[in-house]
Amino acid sequence: MKLLILGGTSDALEIAQQVLQQHQVIYSIKGLVRQPKLACTLHSGGFGGVTGLIQFLQQQQIDYLIDATHPYAATISHHANLAAQATQIPCFHYQRPAWVAYPDDHWITFQNINQLPLLFSAFTPAITHPFFALGQLPLAFINKKATHHTYVIRTVVDTIKAQTKVIPIVDRGAFSIANEHRLFQQYSIDALISKNSGGDKVVAKIRVARAIQCPVFMLQRPPLVTKFPILAIEQEVVKAINGLIKL
């Protein structure tokens, strides 16, 4: 069976490694992710929208499409749903379970970063050093920050131009509890802005925020609307690929 795995996450990489021995795999990545070391064909870059993905599926004679992209990669997941329907290729999505707030967490959920200035302004005590762990932020959003704010922004590449009271941190996870605790102390972090990525690879910042009672502004996951199954356990994905369970 020939599989196309839409990857770019540690989960997708682990799934691919487990099915390589039994199936022919094309592993697709896009964006600022590490080039994986896999004994299979790699496809780097996009497909050119739904039409391009349909053509790729047909040209490569793909038997099974697995969307194991990041929970916030809504566009490619939507394209996978439409392309699989158009080609009548079996498909499923893997999404790791979201984090759940503990009783001693202080989470404020939001749906769009443009909501943050109002949420910040209403917060007591006043936020001064918010830590953005969202990836790249639009420059227009950064330029509108309040004068009393110092933004600490962590990304995998430095795309932030010199800005007053903006501290870029170029680093790539996973991050340890000790690493995140040092960061919070070094930059006097008093608010964390995070995606609900789920999993244990980047959860350390959430645990540190909990330990020091730092508020967490949590970006809600985009909804995944699809006609195909959504699985949340890696082993279920492998079993599905190997035909051991019926979807």
Image (cartoon, rainbow, N blue to C red):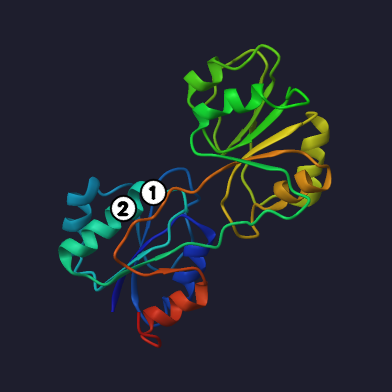
Residue 190 sits above or below residue 57 on the image: above
Give the residue at the far bottom of this rendering.
244
Q: Is residue 39 left or right of residue 153?
A: left
Q: Are marks 2 and 1 in contact (CB under 8 Å)?
A: yes
Q: What number of labels is visible? A: 2
- Front in this rendered view, residue 235 or 212: 212
Task: Tell me where residue 186 sits by quadrant.
Answer: top right
Taking 174 as reference, is 124 left or right?
A: right
The residue drawn where x is 42% and y is 44% is 31
> Who is closer to the viewer here, 246 or 186?
246
The residue nearer to you, when weighing 44 against 189, is: 189
Quadrant for the N terminus, please.
bottom left
**Few, some or many residues within 10 Å of mark 2 (<14, 14–19, 20+):** some
Which residue carries the number 2 mark? 78
* Separation of residues labelled 2 and 1 (CA atoms): 6 Å
Name the amino acid type tagged 1.
Answer: Ala
Q: At which x and y percent is residue 166?
A: 65, 20
Classify 179 as above or below 102: above
* Label at residue 203: none
x, y percent for residue 7:
42, 58
Residue 137, image x and y in percent? 52, 29
Instruction: Identify the mark at residue 74; answer none if there is no mark.
Output: 1
* 121 vs 209, nearest the viewer: 121
Numbered disc 1: secondary structure: helix
Q: Looking at the image, is 83 positioned above or below residue 18? A: above
Q: Residue at x 42, y 61 (%)?
A: 68
Quarter of the picture holding the C terminus: bottom left
Which class describes the residues within 10 Å of circle 1: few (<14), some (14-19), or many (20+)?
some
Q: Quadrant of residue 58?
A: bottom left
Element under label 2?
Answer: helix
Q: Is residue 167 visible?
A: no
Q: Amino acid at mark 2?
A: His
